[in-house]
Image (cartoon, rainbow, N blue to C red):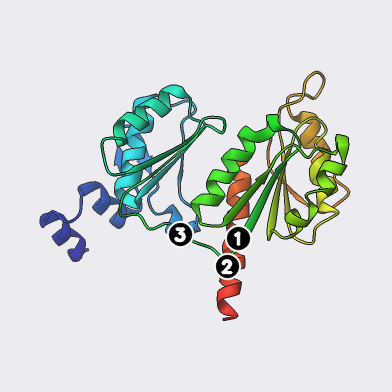
C-alpha cells in the first residue's frame, strides 16, 4: 500500500489507478469499472454501452484505459462511437471500431497486446449473423488468441460447410453462430474433435424467429456442445477465451 501511495504522491500513478490497485475497481461518475477482472478471471472487463448515455460510456472507457491500458465497449451505437472516438483520437491511444458488431476497442500507447498459443474459429450460418459473431471475436482478440471468422456456411447448402471443415477442425475451440433453427452448431459439433460453443441468434422471423427456435434447437442438440443465451456473443467469446487460455497454459507446461 505504501508503494502505491508514494507513487500517487510522486505523480507516477493517478488516483483512479491507485484506487483500482487497492480496491480492485475504479469509481467514475457513471459507475464502477472492474479493473481487476482480467487479473482475477483472465478476461478483460467489458463495458456494455446499451442503456448507457455516450457520456457514461466515455467515463467508463477513460477509467478502463487509465487503470488497465485498454477498454472494450460492446453494443455501441453511432453516438457512443462518436463520443469515444472524439475523446481518444486527440491522445496517443488507438481506437478500433466494428460498426456491425457494435464494438469499440481502445488501447493506450503503452499497452502490451497479449498473445496466446491457441486458435478460435468463429463461424456463422448467414452473413446476417455477423454482429453477434463480431462481438464474440472482439473478446477472443482481446485475450490474444488467434481468431478466424468464416461467414455464411449454413446447412441449407451443406457443401459450404464441408468446404471449410479443414480450417474449422484446426481450431482449438469453435464458436458456431446461427439463427432460424440453428442447425449449424449441431452439425459442426458432430464433425470436429474440439469444444463447440453454440450461439442462437434472433435473425429468423415468424414463429420462434426471435431466437427462441434457435435456442430450443441447440438445447436439444443430439451432439455434445455448450449453449449460451440468444445473441450472447460476448458470453460465447468469454467461454472461448477461457478455453484458449487453458490451451496456451497447457502448451507452456509441455515446453
Residue at the image point whose x is 54% and y is 47% from the top = 139
Q: Is residue 51 left or right of residue 92?
A: right
Quadrant of the drawing holding the N terminus: bottom left
Q: Is residue 38 visible?
A: yes
Mark-to-mark CA distance, 2 and 1: 6 Å
Please determine whether, in this image, residue 96 is positioned above or below residue 116. above
Earlier sequence position, callout 3 versus callout 2: 3
Q: Secondary structure at mark 1?
A: helix
User: Among all residues in the image, which is located at the extreme left?
Assistant: 10
Residue at the image point whose x is 57% and y is 67% from the top = 248
Quadrant of the drawing holding the C terminus: bottom right
Mark-to-mark CA distance, 3 and 1: 12 Å
How far across and down, in percent of the image, does residue 77 sit? Answer: 48, 25
Question: Mark 1 packing: few (<14 Cα in 10 Å), some, or many (20+)?
Answer: many
Please determine whether, in this image, residue 251 is positioned above or below residue 74. below
Q: Residue 204, labelled with which disc?
A: none
Residue at the image point whose x is 58% and y is 56% from the top = 146
Earlier sequence position, callout 3 versus callout 1: 3
Residue at the image point whose x is 10% and y is 57% from the top = 10
Q: Give the residue at mark 2.
A: 248
Circles 3 and 1: CB atoms closer than 8 Å: no
Mark-to-mark CA distance, 3 and 2: 12 Å
Q: Give the residue at mark 1.
A: 244
How far across and down, in percent of the image, does residue 106 sit? Answer: 39, 42
Please determine whether, in this image, residue 4 is positioned above or below residue 183. below
Q: Is residue 14 left or right of residue 49?
A: left
Q: Give the residue at mark 3.
A: 114
Question: Mark 2 packing: few (<14 Cα in 10 Å), some, or many (20+)?
Answer: some
Amino acid at each position: 500500500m505504501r508503494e502505491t501511495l508514494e507513487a500517487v504522491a510522486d505523480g507516477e500513478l493517478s488516483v483512479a489507478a491507485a484506487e483500482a490497485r487497492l480496491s480492485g475497481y475504479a469509481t467514475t461518475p457513471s459507475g464502477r469499472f472492474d479493473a481487476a477482472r482480467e487479473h482475477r478471471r483472465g478476461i478483460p472487463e467489458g463495458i456494455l454501452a446499451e442503456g448507457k448515455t455516450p457520456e457514461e460510456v466515455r467515463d467508463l472507457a477513460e477509467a478502463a484505459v487509465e487503470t488497465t491500458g485498454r477498454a472494450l465497449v460492446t453494443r455501441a451505437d453511432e453516438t457512443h462511437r462518436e463520443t469515444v472516438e472524439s475523446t481518444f483520437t486527440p491522445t496517443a491511444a488507438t481506437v478500433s471500431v466494428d460498426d456491425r458488431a457494435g464494438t469499440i476497442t481502445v488501447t493506450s500507447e503503452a499497452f502490451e497486446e497479449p498473445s496466446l498459443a491457441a486458435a478460435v474459429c468463429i463461424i456463422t450460418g448467414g452473413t446476417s449473423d455477423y454482429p453477434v459473431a463480431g462481438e464474440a471475436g472482439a473478446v477472443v482478440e482481446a485475450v490474444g488468441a488467434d481468431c478466424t471468422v468464416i461467414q455464411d456456411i449454413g446447412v441449407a447448402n451443406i457443401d459450404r460447410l464441408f468446404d471449410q471443415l479443414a480450417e474449422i477442425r484446426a481450431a482449438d475451440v469453435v464458436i458456431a453462430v446461427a439463427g432460424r433453427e440453428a442447425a449449424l452448431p449441431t452439425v459442426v459439433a458432430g464433425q470436429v474433435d474440439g469444444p463447440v460453443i453454440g450461439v442462437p441468434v434472433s435473425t429468423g422471423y415468424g414463429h420462434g424467429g426471435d431466437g427462441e427456435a434457435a435456442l430450443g434447437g441447440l438445447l436439444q442438440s443430439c451432439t455434445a456442445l455448450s449453449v449460451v443465451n440468444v445473441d450472447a456473443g460476448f458470453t460465447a467469446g468469454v467461454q472461448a477465451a477461457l478455453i484458449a487460455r487453458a490451451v496456451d497454459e497447457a502448451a507452456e507446461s509441455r515446453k
